[in-house]
Amino acid sequence: MTDLQEPRPGAGHGDTGGLYAELRAAVRGAVEFGTTARALHTMDASNYRREPIGVVAPRDADDVAAVLSVCREHGVPVVARGGGTSIAGQATGTGVVLDFTRHMNGIVSLDPEARTAVVQPGLVLDRLQEAAAPHGLRFGPDPSTHSRCTLGGMIGNNACGSHSVAWGTTADSVRELSVLTARGEPLTPGRGWRGAPDGLRPLVEGGLALLRTGYPVLPRRISGYALDALLPERGADVARSFCGSEGTLGVLTEAVVDLVRTPPARVLAVLAYPDESAAAEAAAGLLPYHPLTVEGMAADLVPPSAGLPRGGAWLFVEVGGESGAQARAAAEAIVRAADVTDAVVVADPAGQRALWRLREDASGTATRTPDGAGEAWPGWEDCAVPPARLGDYLRDFRRLLADHGLRGTPYGHFGDGCIHVRIDFDLMSARGVARFRRFSEEIAELVVSHGGSLSGEHGDGQARAELLPKMYGPDLVALFERAKDIWDPDDLLNPGMLVRPARLDENLRFAVLPREPVDVVFGYPADGGDFSAAVRRCVGVAKCRTTAVAGAGVMCPSFRATGAEEHSTRGRARLLHEMLAGEVVTDGWRSTEVRDALDLCLSCKGCRTDCPVGVDMATYKAEFLHHHYAGRRRPAAHYAMGWLPVWLGAVARTRTAPVVNVLASAGLPAALGRRLGGIAPERGIPRLARETFTRWWRRESGGPARKRTGTDGASRVVLWPDTFTEHLSPSVGKAAVRVLEAAGLDVVLPPAVRNGRGWPGGAGPRARRGRVCCGLTYVSTGQLDRARTVLRRTLDLMDPVLAAGLPVVVLEPSCAAALRTDLPELLHDDPRAARLASAVVTFAEALERLAPDWTPPGVNRPVVGQTHCHQHAVLGEAADRRLREAAGLTGELSGGCCGLAGDFGFTEGHFEVSKACAEEQLLPAVAAAPDGAVVLADGFSCRTQLEQLAGRTARHLAEVLADALERARGEGTKE
């Protein structure tokens, strides 16, 4: 978990050792000044980076007061942080970071009658929504990061979200706050000057004229301090004025928030327009229909498979009603009133969720330019203009982009005039940073000319605070500075934000990265071969920090098991970033901090698909392990399980599987074997098959025992004998042969010698001299040199297959994924690698593509289990879903990861996390299965996990269909 080591000498401000000791003595929560903790908190989701002294996770308000007292004595700044998803840099700092997500993260109370809740600052928004939902209530604002952003962060930024046209900003939902000032004074800001620090009221009363005239009028004005909320005609609401202060005025310890009634039924109208400007101009005209949302997206951010109505841009307009019919009627009225090229009304909740995921993932999707050739960054992420001006503003915005040679795709809250956009700034070179500054200055002037706000949702932070005089003028900015000094006279809280700010082109996160590509083994084709660019993919949107799986999602099982930032995809990416920077993590590839964070990565590849920017931590982990252990002895598990194909091959050649099984099940020999092999003592060792799959194949194909159903004109497929099918589950291979041949396909095995002698079938005197292998076990343990050797040998063996252009059916999802992705990325210099990768098909894909007229036997039973994580992340499951439906296997498979994940769950020290992953989705789903349900698991790891933790036997889909074929034949014989 998170390190507790003391600070290294010279780190941070002054006497950090003394600061650490005093905080440890004064605080009951965690005090962490070690390398890992500091590295994890250098960045948020912005372009900025600062190295903190340390991190404190307070347990309560007393802990917060103690931290403030100690830091004030040492002159060390304090930065309050929630989910770390801020886009303007306000969740970074050089002092002590307060992490509220670990302990101060609960709901103190919820009153359905009063429609209020009392919450702590580290509470994730979705947890509040889940608690309020049974009462027909919800918290109104809902940023796209709702599954990981915190209420404290939302109050600090005055966050909004897609439903702001109906329910406003966070400030509209805050009733009362509990705050500690930098000097430790407890205040309870509310209406009527309640909780105001001394001096604030005279300041406001002396500047009434300026406050009444100095603010633009628009729904999404977030920039600067909301001192106008203190006007007498607005109720002198101190709580409201505190919202959006970005942790610069006081530290929030509790909040009383309002809840709103959720419409019983909701329907989504998707309206298509020729382009984004047309959509923007139409948005304001829909507000009289009282929609819940009016969100805009352009085609650049929408995959072709999304199934949206024909157009170049869309408005997502959600409406509510007391019934489904009423909501649908309201949606259809909007469609009739809108001037659209096309439209669709979506009433199905699952269909609505799928469309909203497109919108919510846009902050990550937009970080790559539409053609995939470049990177795009925040910085002008969320400026806002009056909704009626949005179309004109977007046209001017596009012209300004073109003038600077920049590209970006606007999207966002069109109904509120708030635009999100990621722009392809070059933040790696001095010339690019200079252009970033010039554009920022000019776009600020453009926004102001349209009566807008520099920030419409995410706050100013470092990205925009320097430019606030353009929006407010010097007099109002001076008033902001005086307000800050009243609340925080020592400038202790988040200095450099909002007032007296750092320059917008300082502290850029990329400035510390190497300018030359790092020497690596994988090809990183999507990142131009640059490992630094691959690591930069993580922009901090933190979808990996969700505490519950959405649908069939996987990412990030280790974070959900531990709750620790360093075991999230974002946390690991942060550590790799700091490793490349060399300032906080100073040991490079030898870093133990990076190694320990990656240790609990299951290599599930869930992030490759579930992460909006396609971070592939499994590949980064393999790359790191390769360099980390170069020239050094590896952990025992790397030899025991990394070289599994070699050991199992030796057992097969010597025909000693029965002996090995006896030893593996005997107490002392088994315990000794686990200890020597680095295997978890809680694990049983799987039994080896007495006869391997290929040996059965040669015996069957060489004699009369099996009548091949394929004809000379049948499509030929090559069945891949992966290590697990070959040695541990040959029944899967046998079943696949029966089903594929029943479908009219001609099944052969890969060549067993380089010149193809004995192929097809692998028979012949030299058949055992070579074996194909996907290299998975070597890749997952970072033995990349060995993996490349094995894969080159495999390509040599597969030459006849590639020459013939035959499809290669791979039954084990993890092996298929390795061949589809790891092979071409490791052997990017060998064109055969891409050819083999493209030839790989799953069992279901083979049947669907090569035997489209075949009808599978009817199983007609419910199904339970889990979609293999590599199936979800790399291979796709659509063909499997259709095959199950055709066979009458009803029901949905769960998401998540089984937790065994190849060698991961067998490795010593991983058992508890492995078990926790299984207990999240898989084991409960199987336990709740109806009588007669088929327990389905195509992966050997998944089947083993179910057997060892639940005592349940799971089967590959091929086995289920083969049994159904046998039953059908038996019934036909009886007739």
Image (tube, helix red, strand yellow):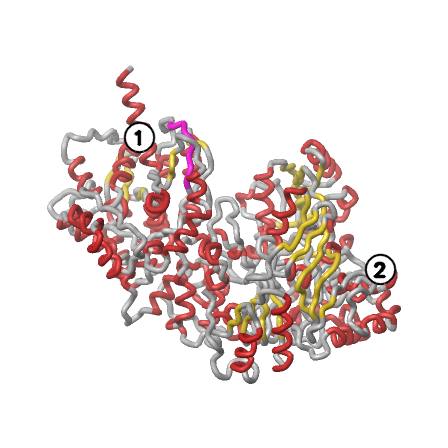
Identify the residue at image location x=81%, y=60%. Answer: 191
**Which numbered disc, 2 or 1, marks the residue that appears first in the sequence?**
2
Tag 1: amino acid = Asp
Give the number of the disc on residue 963: 1
Q: Quadrant of the C terminus?
A: top left
Rendering quarter of residue 215: bottom right
Most foreground residue, 530 or 626: 626
Look at the image and give the residue range highlighted in magenta. 859-865
Tag 2: amino acid = Arg
Residue 722 seen from this side: yes
Closer mark to the observer between disc 2 and disc 1:
2
Does 671 appear above or below 293? below
Identify the residue at image location x=17%, y=53%. Answer: 650
The residue that disc 2 covers is 234
Is residue 551 shown left or right of residue 291? left
Does 556 appear above or below 534? above
Residue 862 included in the magenta stretch of the image: yes
Most foreground residue, 286 or 71: 71
Is residue 100 shown left or right of residue 254? left
Question: Under tag 1, what secondary structure?
Answer: helix
Does 397 appear above or below 127? below
Most foreground residue, 904 or 211: 904
Question: Residue 372, position in %: x, y?
Answer: 51, 57
Residue 163 included in the magenta stretch of the image: no
